Image (cartoon, rainbow, N blue to C red):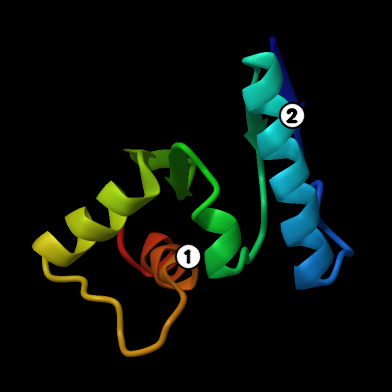
Amino acid sequence: MIWPLIALATGLDSFNALLLCQLLQRMAKERNHAIIMTIHMPRENIIELFDNLILMSKGNMAWFGPVKAAVEHLQNVGFNIPGNMNPADHMLDLATIVS
C-alpha cells in the first residue's frame, strides 16, 4: 500500500514535525507500506529518516535515490555543502537556482 501525503507537517513546529515523521516511518516499516510525501524546509534529522528522496526542480526530477547519495553526488560535481548548512536547505537552494 502507498500513502500519499501532501505537506503533512505544514503548520507544525520542527520538533513535532520530526515526531510525526518518526511515527510515519515506524508505521510504514511495520506494515511494509510506502509513504510518498511532500515536505517543505525539513530539518536535517527529518530528511535523514527518508529511505529515498525525489528532488524536483522547475517541474522536472533533479534527483531520485537515497538522501546520502544525493549529498555525495552534489559534492562530486562541485556543490559542496557550506559549513553548518542543513543538507536539505542546500539541495533546495540548488534545485531553485540550477537548471
Residue 7: x and y in percent read 77, 48
Q: Is residue 76 or residue 49 the one in the foreground?
A: 49
Residue extending farthest to the top is 1
Q: Is residue 66 left or right of residue 14?
A: left
Q: Is residue 12 left or right of residue 92?
A: right
- Position above or below: 6 against 71: above
Q: Residues within 10 Å of mark 1 (few under 14, many from 20)?
A: many
Residue 78 picture quarter: bottom left
- Please, what is the three-letter code of the amino acid marked with disc 1? Ala
Q: Which residue is under mark 1?
A: 88
In the picture, which quadrant includes the C terminus? bottom left
Q: Secondary structure at mark 1?
A: helix
> Which is closer to the viewer, label 2 or label 1?
2
Q: Residues within 10 Å of mark 2 (few under 14, many from 20)?
A: some
Residue extending farthest to the right is 11
Residue 53: x and y in percent read 45, 42
Asked whether the beta carbons under mark 2 and mark 1 sit within 8 Å of each other, the answer is no
Residue 1: x and y in percent read 69, 9
Residue drawn where x is 42% and y is 83% of the image? 85
Residue 81 picture quarter: bottom left
Residue drawn where x is 26% and y is 48% of the image? 69
Residue drawn where x is 40% and y is 60% of the image? 95
- Please, what is the three-letter code of the amino acid marked with disc 2? Met
Q: Is residue 46 or residue 41 the one in the foreground?
A: 46
State the mark number for residue 9. none
Q: Which residue is under mark 2?
A: 27
Residue drawn where x is 62% and y is 25% of the image? 29
Q: Secondary structure at mark 2?
A: helix
